[in-house]
Every structure is written in structure tokens, then in C-alpha cells.
Image: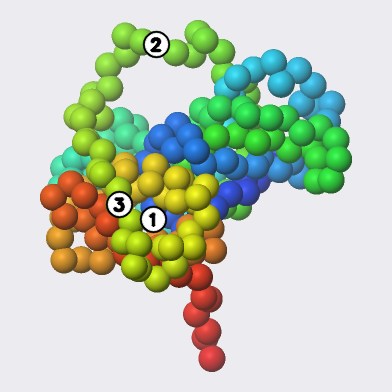
Amino acid sequence: MEFVPVAHIENDFKEKFGIPKQGGMAQSVLSRVVFEGEYADPNALRGIEGFSHIWLLWEFSKSKRGSFSPTVRPPVLGGNERMGVFATRSPNRPNPIGMTSVRLEKAVLSGDGAPYLIVSGADLLDGTPIYDVKPYIARDCHPDAHEGFNSKPRPRLEVVFDEEGEGIEGLDPAIRQQLAEILSFDPRPSYQDDPDRVYGMRYAELNVKFSVREGVLKVTSASAFEEQSNS
């Protein structure tokens, strides 16, 4: 079988580090699902505006995969314990397929760049290929479902901004809100808890730096991102 992308996603997640570990976590972050080629036909989306949520089936396009491994180390377990790959949502899979349910905020079927969908809660890297879009229906939800080893709660962090840090004072309020929500879920690997370490992530066109101490994540700077020259 040959799979062809029907769309790609556009958002402010420019690198893997910092992307929410599951869909639906950062609802303040909006993304565009932009359709491509013959699939950029408004007729293919007829009726979709009647659904509040949709499923995205996509590719772990930036995940490096070698030979098949039947077990992986889930970050939620600290990266020290192995579980079967089919019992996890690891990107290191036989077929690099991801699936995410997102809220459909708006379907734009005409005008510049149409058709495209505006969604919230996506956990996809900017540019990720999307292979299918399906409506989410209430029967997809199982309130009595067991979550296995994923049921272990991970407390959210308090996020504060160092107003004297580079770029913080002039930070766009919407970006500030998005960063606060994203970072509250703690993007660090579970096995890293060095209070003196400064972490960095790219979000939108910003190079964001932060540290974590005693449950408080402090954003120390949000400067303009500069591409590294290879010359």
C-alpha cells in the first residue's frame, strides 16, 4: 500500500522538544491543517463543520528509526523501564503513524489558502504530513477506560516569567499565554531534574530558555531565534 499525505500542519512548534506529550493538553495553541494537491477540494470537507472534534492520522516524520525493537522506554516511566512498543505511544514504531484528536475551531472552505481547518490541542510538529482526517464522535470516548502505566499523575508546574529577562517584557500576550500552558506540563524528560540546568526550546520565532526548581518553571528569556550559519 502506498500512502500519500492529504495535508500538512502549520503551527508554532518548530522543534520536537517542548511539544505537549499528548494531544489536547495545550488548548490555547492553534494550528492549521492545510490540504494539498487534489485533496485541496472543499467538497472533500463538506459537512465537517458539524463536528466539534476530529481525528488526525499523521507521520512521525522527524523520528529516527533503526531496526525494529519490540520494547521502548516510555518517558512517563522515567526512561528506565521497558514496555512493549504496542503498549506505548512511542514514535519508534514499525510504521511511524501517529493519531491525535483535536478540537475543530473553524473550517475555512473558501478564500486565500483555502480549504484549511483551524484546530486546537494538536501535538504535531510544524510541517508534519497528515494522511487522513476523520470525524470524532461521542462513541469514541470510553469514560471507564483504564490507562495502564500512563495513569500515574504528573503534577503541573507553576510557570513564572522573569520580567527582566531578554525579550520577556515585550512578549506578545497570546504567546505568553501559550508558553505558560505548554510549559506547565513540563517538557523535560522525566529523568531530568537538575535545578541548575537551563533548558532551551524554539517556539514560533523565539528561542525560549527556562529552568525548573521545586515545582516552579521560570522563563528567563524569549529572544528572537537566529538560524545557525554553517559557514
**Type of the residue with mark 3:** Val
Could you say where residue 227 lies in the image, as x and y percent from the top left?
53, 76
Residue 116 vertical placement versus 162 (above, below): above
Instruction: Give the residue displayed 36% in from the left and 10% down from the top.
Output: 143
Q: Nearer the viewer, residue 129 or 123?
A: 123
Q: Nearer the viewer, residue 126 or 197?
A: 197
Determine the secondary structure under disc 1: loop
**Disc 3 and disc 1: Cα gap in Å?**
19 Å
Instruction: Give the residue displayed 39% in from the left and 11% down from the top.
Output: 142
Q: Which circle's residue, 1 or 2, is located before the other in the chain?
A: 1
**Type of the residue with mark 2:** His
Could you say where residue 62 lies in the image, as x and y percent from the top left?
49, 55
**Type of the residue with mark 1:** Phe
Determine the secondary structure under disc 3: strand
Q: Does residue 197 show up?
A: yes
Instruction: Give the residue displayed 16% in from the left and 42% down from the top.
Output: 81
Q: Are the residues flagged by discs 3 and 2 in contact, CB closer than 8 Å?
A: no
Badge 3 is on which residue?
160
Q: In which image quadrant can residue 90 be found?
A: top left
Residue 142: assigned label: 2
**Disc 3 and disc 2: Cα gap in Å?**
36 Å
Q: Which quarter shows the N terminus?
A: top right
Relative side of 226 to 218, left or right: right
Could you say where residue 64 lies in the image, as x and y percent from the top left?
42, 57
Q: Which circle's residue, 3 or 1, is located before the other in the chain?
A: 1
Instruction: Give the residue displayed 50% in from the left and 38% down from the top.
Output: 28
**Disc 1 and disc 2: Cα gap in Å?**
30 Å
Residue 17: assigned label: 1
